Image (cartoon, helix red, strand yellow):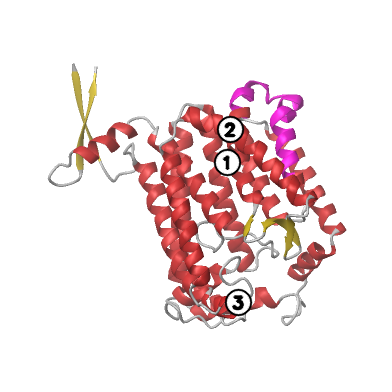
């Protein structure tokens, strides 16, 4: 017997809401990113390559690769994601060790976080975020009942997470390490780790980061420059000052696409770490709020996935990926507006850079795969492709008994 149910499309109660929230917010962020990368990178591209579109064209190539992988991964099954996690983690740890110990490791901006093979370079810590999210989902979904003890919290998930974060910190990349700590915290919170362990872990993390900052003069200079009210605007606070000027000059509506003044070699990393400032300068408060709304849509979608799925692996992994992408975005924005010291993390899906863009899109692809697995989502998506009612607001979903 066939049962016919009628479901409204386009409402928060729809089984496909998470899927369309993720797809639309990602598309919005990517399109905005392309527009601002085109503008913000043009001057530096002329200086380096003699072609104002050289970095933009590279970004388009990375986008095509990332979108292809996103679509491919979104069609995967939960079993595929579970199998992928350990292998990706092993590869990430291996490449992080190569960054730290091999001659192929390269330092940029005081952080040793790149692998450089001639014309090809990559940032392994970006892939390590995705690997860690998948691994924690697999490990914690099997260890939920043991998280009430210290041994259960540390072995194996806590130890592995600590190893990955330590390898990133070995290169001095405190920004990426902070994002990973957010990712790990979200995974353990979703898995049900008792609050007392979070308090102890937070104290240990803050103490460790403070010690690292004290031992590395470059990091200490960034923090003291951010903290000091008398920071020299022509020296250590040059970048933050020009980022603030860019946001201020944009006003509500912005100067217009391509009309940024700070991109003319005044603002370092204009197309990467400080792209949010150029966005605010050219598109104003409206443009910056637009990005915040898109990020809020991702938060809502991830929350729905965690609430509606019954598989602990999906719940933990989705929370970890969401914390990584949205948490990193919030950290990047906090740096640009002066609420945090300069950390060197890009704005996911918006900033230039192949490693970040491709890895973020793969993470979104996994979230889309989870969204397709929500109760009723597959049937609704299949029915919408096959048949639309006249008003486009109602679909019929038929389930065979």
Indicate left or right for 397 with 210 as reference: left
Range of the magenta residues? 140-165
Indicate left or right for 48 with 39 as reference: right
Indicate left or right for 121 with 74 as reference: right
Q: Which mark is residue 294?
A: none
Q: Given this view, does label 3 or label 2 mark the residue nearer the observer?
A: 3
Above or below: residue 72 compared with residue 54: above
Q: Earlier in the sequence, mark 3 or mark 1?
A: 3
Q: Which mark is residue 137?
A: 2
Above or below: residue 214 compared with residue 241: above
Q: Earlier in the sequence, mark 1 or mark 2?
A: 2
Q: As rendered, which of 358 and 245 lies closer to the eye?
A: 358
Q: How busy is the neighbourhood of tag 2: few (under 14 within 10 Å), some, or many (20 plus)? A: many
Q: As rendered, which of 157 and 57 lies closer to the eye?
A: 57
Q: Which residue is mark 1?
A: 320
Is label 3 in contact with label 2 (beta carbons under 8 Å)? Answer: no
Q: Which residue is mark 3?
A: 48
Specify whether residue 155 is painted magenta. Answer: yes
Q: Quadrant of residue 134?
A: top right
Residue at 54% x, 63% y is 351
Q: How busy is the neighbourhood of tag 3: few (under 14 within 10 Å), some, or many (20 plus)? A: few
Image coordinates for residue 329, horizontal then vertical, percent = 56, 57
């Amino acid at each position: 017997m066939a049962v016919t149910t009628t479901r409204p499309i386009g409402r928060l109660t729809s089984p496909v809401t998470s899927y369309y929230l993720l797809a639309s917010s990602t598309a919005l962020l990517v399109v905005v990113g392309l527009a601002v990368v085109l503008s913000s990178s043009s001057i530096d591209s002329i200086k380096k390559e003699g072609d104002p579109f050289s970095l933009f064209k590279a970004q388009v190539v990375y986008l095509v690769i990332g979108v292809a992988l996103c679509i491919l991964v979104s069609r995967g099954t939960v079993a595929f994601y579970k199998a992928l996690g350990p292998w990706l983690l092993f590869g990430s740890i291996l490449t992080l060790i190569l960054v730290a110990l091999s001659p192929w490791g390269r330092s940029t901006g005081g952080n040793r976080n790149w692998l450089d093979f001639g014309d090809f370079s990559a940032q392994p810590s970006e892939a390590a975020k995705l690997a860690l999210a998948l691994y924690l989902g697999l490990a914690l979904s099997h260890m939920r009942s043991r998280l009430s003890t210290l041994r259960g919290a540390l072995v194996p998930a806590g130890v592995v997470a600590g190893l990955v974060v330590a390898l990133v910190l070995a290169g001095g990349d405190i920004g990426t390490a902070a994002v990973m700590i957010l990712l790990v915290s979200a995974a353990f919170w979703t898995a049900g780790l008792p609050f007392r362990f979070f308090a102890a872990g937070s104290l240990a993390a803050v103490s460790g980061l403070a010690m690292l900052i004290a031992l590395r003069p470059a990091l200490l200079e960034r923090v003291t420059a951010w903290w000091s009210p008398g920071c020299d605007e022509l020296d250590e606070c040059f970048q933050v000052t020009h980022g603030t000027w860019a946001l201020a000059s944009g006003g509500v509506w912005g100067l217009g696409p391509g009309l940024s003044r700070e991109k003319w070699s005044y603002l370092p990393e204009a197309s990467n770490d400080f792209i949010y400032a150029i966005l605010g300068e050219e598109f104003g408060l409206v443009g910056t709020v637009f990005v915040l709304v898109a990020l809020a849509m991702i938060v809502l979608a991830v929350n729905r996935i965690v609430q509606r799925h019954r598989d602990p692996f999906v719940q933990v992994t989705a929370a970890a990926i969401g914390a990584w992408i949205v948490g990193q975005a919030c950290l990047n924005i906090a740096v640009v507006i002066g609420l945090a010291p300069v950390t060197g993390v890009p704005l996911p899906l918006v900033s230039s850079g192949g490693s970040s863009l491709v890895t973020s899109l793969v993470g979104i692809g996994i979230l889309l795969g989870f969204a397709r697995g929500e109760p009723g989502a597959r049937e609704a998506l299949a029915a919408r492709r096959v048949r639309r009612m006249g008003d486009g607001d109602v679909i019929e979903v038929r389930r065979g008994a």
